[in-house]
């Protein structure tokens, strides 16, 4: 009987822990959003520079 009670207690505690952690989603602030926008802009710039470099290589050949 004690083993069943212990298993139930552990299961209940794990369930509560999982529910608590999944409910704590952190909201993004304005600085995090701005940082993501800067990252996207830098990535786009890098892609365009790479394409320009490829065009220059092709024109030299």
Image (cartoon, helix red, strand yellow):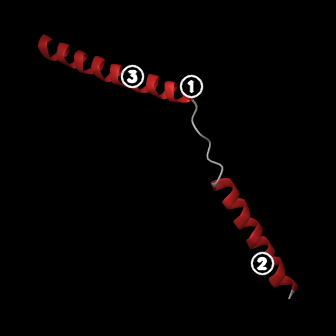
- Give the numbered dot on residue 8: 2
Q: Is there a contact, CB below 8 Å, between mark 3 and mark 1?
A: no
The residue sitting at the top extreme is 60
* Residue at mark 3: 41
19 or 47, which lies in front?
A: 19
Position of residue 29 in the picture relative to residue 9 (left or right): left
* Residue at mark 1: 31
Q: Secondary structure under badge 3?
A: helix
Residue 12 vertical position relative to residue 34 in the rendered view, above or below: below
Q: Which residue corresponds to the image point at 68% horizontal and 54% vertical from the top-left?
A: 21
17 or 42, which lies in front?
A: 17
Mark 1 nearby-residue class (10 Å; few <14, some 14–19, many ≥20): few
Q: Which residue corresponds to the image point at 59% horizontal and 39% vertical from the top-left?
A: 27
Position of residue 39 in the picture relative to residue 46 (left or right): right
Task: Where is residue 29? Give x, y as percent.
Answer: 58, 31
Q: Secondary structure under badge 1?
A: helix
Task: Where is residue 45? Give x, y as percent.
Answer: 34, 19
Mark closest to the chain's N terminus, 3 or 2: 2
Q: Quadrant of the N terminus?
A: bottom right
Q: Secondary structure under badge 2?
A: helix
Q: How many dots with numbers? A: 3
């Amino acid at each position: 009987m004690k083993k069943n009670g212990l298993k139930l207690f552990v299961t209940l505690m794990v369930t509560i822990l999982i529910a608590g952690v999944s409910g704590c989603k952190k909201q993004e602030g304005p600085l995090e959003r701005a940082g993501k926008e800067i990252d996207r802009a830098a990535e786009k710039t890098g892609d365009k520079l790479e394409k320009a470099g490829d065009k220059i290589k092709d024109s030299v050949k």
